[in-house]
Image: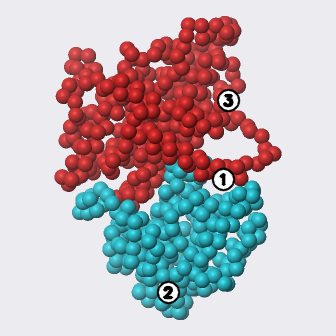
């Protein structure tokens, strides 16, 4: 099997999970209601836990141990999409991001559940079960806030428009798309993007929101190849702050 | 988490004058027999007010307590610590949720309680007005401040108000995990590299006095709480809590090769009681009344969170549904 392609795929998914998890955890203590502090923390724990599983898989393929790859790389070595690294902003942005990103994520894991790469197929089946609840959370909030007050609808609409170019960056293709399809590892970003568009259209059609004209938006790409916004490096510095005090130590 | 040192409303001699003496003695007899008081049961006004005040302070302490540790979630060293700390702080917010519900059964809404927190009317545990400078401070809190909270909460779980006791039963189980996690973190620092050991010792030096103060002023200068003890609102005196904590944790701290910054600290071999240098109680009063190193920052964070989240709460409110007091 094409190990290089698998490593590339695992890195981008693991990095996405780690960084979105890190961002979601920033709501702890600051949520609009206590129940949302708890919800965002739960989702963050799931996602960071999933990234750990994927980093372990990478370790099995000859990469460094999870703590080293997660905490010690620089921004240009990260393969996450730019969408996940953006700051949490206000709750409107965070909930829109949760909706757009998690929808792509659950479809990705649905697709990967039948991957020819057995360890990833097994993990994806498990992740799917966890992310199901994240989707329920996102969809409930989209429906509630997207139909409630004038302010909530406007906020969500603005956030949707800000988020969309970055959301489309999730589907930036890798150089291994064909190889992965040929070997049955992953059915590819283009398929994922089509399924995603259908699902978000359906949820948004039950709100007072308008879906931006996706076909005419230039996606914010580069993340998959190590090109990031200015927000990622400070996040990574913060993440490694304690470890770097004494990198050889056992914390 | 919450220590002793609950601030109760001062009670005058005629606080109970208005109460029906027959009902009052029935109520006291029930408590005496070890029965739990439930939300719909008759209770003296003073019992209700003091309980609201105490449970509310406890709930506030959980959410404010989530702040100093919460700032270390994004910096926790490695996956294991990061995941554990996230779960721990999430538990603390969950405790607040449970406790606000318990207090709501007595007739004050969560919104009103949070408003009183923000406007400074109601208090929270003084210990959270001190900063967590380093990762080691965060570990100190997880182990030893939580340990202090457990002493108090285990005692209060045997109190007289049903909903509060049931909330505490669940909370103390989770706190036991926090303690284990915190202890594990401290062991790693205390037995680690010279840099780690130094970090841990400095954190202990910083937290020693606030930790002693955590349990509240000594009994001899505290307000009289005999009635509250009789009603099983307050279960253990401040000094009682403090002694229990010293008894359980000073030896464990010493065992790790760490020192405590108090020359007078020793267990009196005759009485079994711990002796220590009395912390500055005037300073304690100053800090609890708003003039500590982090009071303004802590409340500002909470206030900003409330303001930024207002539109969400308004959008979630269903105009036709009515407020229902939870039964807990
Ligand atoms: Fe707690
Ligand atoms: Fe705790």
Q: Colour of chain B?
A: red
Q: Position of residue B39 (x, y in %)?
A: 67, 27
Task: Using the rendered image of the protein, determine whether residue B237 is visible from the camera's viewpoint.
Answer: yes
**Image point 54% across, 68% down: which residue?**
A127
Mark 3 Cα-neighbour bin, 10 Å: few <14, some 14–19, many ≥20: some
The chain painted cyan is A
Tell whether B220 sits left or right of B110: left
Which mark is nearer the camera, 1 or 3? Answer: 1
What percent of the width, then of the height, locates residue A51? 46, 68
Q: State the residue at coordinates (26%, 16%).
A: B271
Picture quadrant where residue B125 is located: top left
Work out whether A142 lies above or below B273.
below
For the residues bearing labels 3 and 2, Cβ distance under 8 angstroms = no
Number of the label disc, if any, that sits on residue B312: 1
Give me the C-alpha separation between circle 1 and circle 3.
24 Å
Residue B29: image x %, image y %?
60, 12
| SS at circle 3 | loop
Instruction: Give whichever of B128, B27 is nearer the camera.
Output: B128
Residue placed under numbered mark 3 in the picture: B107
Q: Is residue A180 left or right of residue A73?
A: right
């Amino acid at each position: 099997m094409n190990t290089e392609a698998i490593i590339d795929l695992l890195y981008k998914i693991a990095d996405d999970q780690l960084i979105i998890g890190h961002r979601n955890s920033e709501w702890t203590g600051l949520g609009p209601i206590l129940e949302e502090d708890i919800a965002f923390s739960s989702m963050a724990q799931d996602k960071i836990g999933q990234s750990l599983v994927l980093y372990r898989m990478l370790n099995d393929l000859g990469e460094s141990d999870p703590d080293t790859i997660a905490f010690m790389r620089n921004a240009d070595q990260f393969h996450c999409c730019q969408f996940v690294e953006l700051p949490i902003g206000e709750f409107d942005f965070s909930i829109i991001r949760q909706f757009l990103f998690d929808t792509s994520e659950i479809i990705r894991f649905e697709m990967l559940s039948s991957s020819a790469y057995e360890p990833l197929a097994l993990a994806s089946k498990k992740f799917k079960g966890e992310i199901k609840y994240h989707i329920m959370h996102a969809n409930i909030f989209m429906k509630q806030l997207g139909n409630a007050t004038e302010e909530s609808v406007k906020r969500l609409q603005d956030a949707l428009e800000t988020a969309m170019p970055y959301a489309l960056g999730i589907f930036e293709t890798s150089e291994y798309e064909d190889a992965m399809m040929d070997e049955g590892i992953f059915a590819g970003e283009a398929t994922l993007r089509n399924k995603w568009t259908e699902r978000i259209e359906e949820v948004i059609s039950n709100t007072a929101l308008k879906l931006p004209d996706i076909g005419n938006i230039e996606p914010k790409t580069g993340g998959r190849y190590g090109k990031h916004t200015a927000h990622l490096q400070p996040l990574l510095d913060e993440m490694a702050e304690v470890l770097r005090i004494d990198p050889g130590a056992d914390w | 988490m919450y220590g002793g040192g609950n601030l109760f409303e001062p009670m005058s001699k005629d606080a109970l004058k208005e109460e029906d003496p027959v009902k009052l003695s029935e109520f006291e007899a029930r408590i005496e027999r070890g029965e739990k008081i439930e939300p719909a049961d008759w209770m003296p006004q003073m019992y209700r007010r003091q309980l609201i005040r105490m449970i509310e302070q406890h709930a506030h302490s959980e959410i404010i307590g989530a702040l100093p540790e919460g700032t270390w979630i994004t910096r926790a060293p490695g996956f294991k610590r990061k995941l554990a700390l996230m779960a721990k702080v999430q538990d603390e917010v969950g405790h607040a949720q449970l406790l606000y519900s318990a207090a709501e059964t007595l007739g004050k809404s969560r919104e009103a309680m949070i408003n009183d927190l923000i406007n400074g009317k109601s208090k929270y545990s003084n210990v959270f007005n001190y900063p967590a400078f380093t990762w080691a401070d965060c570990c100190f809190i997880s182990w030893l401040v939580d340990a202090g909270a457990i002493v108090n909460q285990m005692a209060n779980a045997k109190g007289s108000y049903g909903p509060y006791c049931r909330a505490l039963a669940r909370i103390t189980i989770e706190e036991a995990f926090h303690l284990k996690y915190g202890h594990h973190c401290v062991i790693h620092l205390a037995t680690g590299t010279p840099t780690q050991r130094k970090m841990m010792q400095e954190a202990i030096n910083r937290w020693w006095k606030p930790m002693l103060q955590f349990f509240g002023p000594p009994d001899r200068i505290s307000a009289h709480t005999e009635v509250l003890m009789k009603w099983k609102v307050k279960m253990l005196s401040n000094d009682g809590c403090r002694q229990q904590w010293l008894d359980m944790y000073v030896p464990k701290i010493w065992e790790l090769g760490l020192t405590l910054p108090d020359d007078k600290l020793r267990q009196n071999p005759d009485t079994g009681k711990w002796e220590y240098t009395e912390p500055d109680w005037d300073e304690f009063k100053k800090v609890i009344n708003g003039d500590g190193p982090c009071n303004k920052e802590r409340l500002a964070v909470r206030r900003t969170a409330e303001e930024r989240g207002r539109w969400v709460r308004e959008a979630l409110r269903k105009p036709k549904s009515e407020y229902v007091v939870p039964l807990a």
